[in-house]
Image: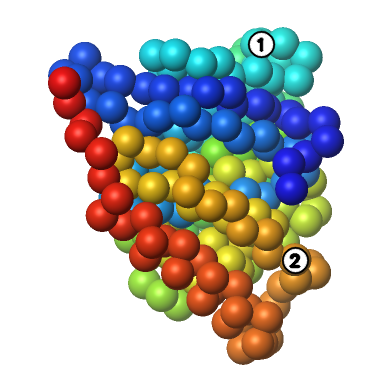
Amino acid sequence: MAPATPLVSVRKVCKRYANGTLALSDVDLDLGTSEFVSLLGPSGCGKSTLLRLIAGLGEPTTGRIDRAGGRDALNGGLSFVFQEPTLMPWATALANVQLPLRLAGVPLAERTERAREALASVGLAGFEQAYPRELSGGMKMRVSIARALVTRPRLLLMDEPFAALDEITRTRLNHDLLALWEREKFTVVFVTHSVYESVFLSQRVVVLAARPGRIADVLQTDAPYPRGPAYRTTPAYAAHCERASAALEACIGACEPATL
């Protein structure tokens, strides 16, 4: 079910790169306020391309992307978490998290306080002066998430942020991300290859077909929040995973010619 008053509307979006590759074709998607949506699909289906277009890091070849209140309405209220933490190795965790506020001209005292709060919100209180080389992979990703949260975004875009982590760390960060989302009420768009992760996290799982990327199915995951470890053992979770797996399998290999 599409949100009644979308925060972002994607309408008939196509994206063709200069080399002729058609990455996305005729994509329609609405993102609601405080909604958690996962983009699920095979490698190369355009999930990350769509995320970057929503972020304004590129322009669609055709179609449009509308934001509530106008094109610039989310300025300062949109954050992006990449697949890698992309931290400055010479800077402490605190300085890394402060970076967006420093670039925005926020005074030192305020940005320090907000960065400390953001680190505490991801479980890293006490690690403010640690350097990236002193942190585990999961802790580095927590710093990256804290840096995204420090701007207090309305829209948080996450491009497979946990894909490189071990299963235990990934599961823990899934739970921590949901707790943050429930508390802060921002909208999340989360790119993943994992059926199990998408079903656990999301209210809606948007399944993209193989290139050119297009929406093959939209699955509602109606289990209530909070979703703890016990949810992963329920028949409802298993049923949603089975449906998502079937939708993903149906679209794998359904690939149209990508070049002219």
Q: Is residue 214 above or below residue 106?
A: below
Kindly indicate the quadrant of the structure image that contains residue 78.
top right
Q: Which residue is mark 1?
A: 72
Q: Which residue is mark 2?
A: 222
Q: Nearer the viewer, residue 16 or 115?
A: 16
Residue found 60% across the figure and 79% down from its top:
239
Tag 2 secondary structure: loop
55 shown above or below 71: below
Tell whether label 1 touches label 2 (CB within 8 Å).
no
In percent of width and height, residue 188 lies at 63, 44
Q: Is residue 152 left or right of residue 214?
A: right
Q: In the rendered structure, which amino acid carries the disc numbered 1?
A: Asp
Compared to 209, does 177 lie above or below? below
Asked if residue 44 shows in the view, the reply is: no
Residue 237 point in image, percent of width and height: 63, 78
Packing grade of label 1 (10 A; few <14, some 14-19, many >=20) is few
Number of residues whose C-alpha sits closer than 10 Å to that of mark 2, classed few (under 14), some (14–19) or many (20 or more): few
- Residue 110 on image: x %, y %: 73, 27
> In the image, is 171 to the left or to the right of 193?
right
Give x and y (percent) for residue 166.
36, 72
Which label is found at residue 167? none
Q: Is residue 20 above or below residue 208?
A: above
Residue 47 seen from this side: yes
Q: Quadrant of the C terminus?
A: top left
Give the quarter of the image for residue 236.
bottom right
Q: Quadrant of residue 62?
A: top left
Q: Nearer the viewer, mark 2 or mark 1?
A: 2
In the image, what residue type sits under mark 2? Asp
Which sits earlier in the primary sequence, circle 2 or circle 1?
Answer: 1
Work out how far the residue at label 2 is from the one at label 1, CA to CA, in angstroms: 32 Å
Number of numbered discs: 2
